[in-house]
Amino acid sequence: TLTTSFYLCFGVFCYYRHFDRASKDQTRFRSSQIRDEIADSLCTLFWGSMLTAPVFTAQIRGYSKIYPLGSASWWYEMAQYPLFLLFSDTWMYWMHRIFHIPLLFRALHSKHHRYVIPTPFSAYAFHPLEAWIMSLATYAYSFIWPMSDVAQVIVFCTANVWTFLLHDDRDHFHTVHHKNIKLNFGQYMSLWDKVGGTYVNPKTFFQHKPGADRK
């Protein structure tokens, strides 16, 4: 499928473009990790597409508030992007925190956190149910507030590209979360982490723990 082809092609690109392959020599990087990441991600893509199909169908049949680009005022055409960003990050942060409740973590989210040193191939390596719930923010906005058809495509593509960039193990915001599961839960920005007291600056984190968290 198109999604699977995108996953494999963009995953390979990000792996060779951004991932520090010297990380594979560290003890927390399992010999079968990339194979496992790909298998988990492909499984999630399959089941996730099944779960998301009714949402797409509802959008196509007019149950959402999607409208043709240019039908709204110029200011809303611009404003819907930061509004979506705030909506999505609010959903992602708090749902992510919920999935760290011990029962849900063991049942669902621990599948993703076994990759302490993630590669871009772990972009979709979640439990399918969790991945679907987390992805709902991308579609839910259009059922609550108006969104142009072009904006829906843009945020969908952006969300998919962004998840690869989050998992290339560079010393950035989300990598901290894979090293310390109590920190940096956000997706696009650090707003809710700062509000919730879970934020740490990646530069500070990796400067103070250059060895302990990368063994």
Image (spheres, grey):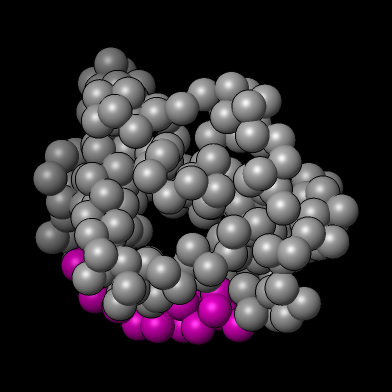
| Residue extending farthest front | 212
Residue 106 in view (yes/no): yes
Q: Position of residue 214 (x, y in %)?
A: 70, 48
Which of the 4 image quadrants contains residue 147?
top left
Q: Position of residue 138 (x, y in %)?
A: 33, 51
Which of the 4 image quadrants contains residue 11?
bottom right
Which one is nearer the viewer's eye here, 193 or 179? 179
Q: Position of residue 7 (x, y in %)?
A: 63, 66
The residue stretch that appears in magenta: 39-59
- Split into 4 quadrants, where in the image is the N terminus? bottom right
Q: Position of residue 26 (x, y in %)?
A: 78, 59
Which of the 4 image quadrants contains residue 192?
top left
Determine if the magenta segment contains residue 46: yes
Measuring 49% from the left and 63% from the top, which residue is drawn there? Answer: 113
| Residue extending farthest top | 75
Classified by dominant secondary structure, the portion drawn in magenta counts as helix
Residue 49 in view (yes/no): no
Measuring 25% from the left and 24% from the top, which residue is drawn there? Answer: 195
Left or right, residue 174 beside residue 130: right
Which one is nearer the viewer's eye here, 192 or 205? 205
Determine if the magenta segment contains residue 141: no
Measuring 68% from the left and 63% from the top, which residue is drawn there? Answer: 28
Is residue 16 depicted above or below 206 in this figure?
A: below
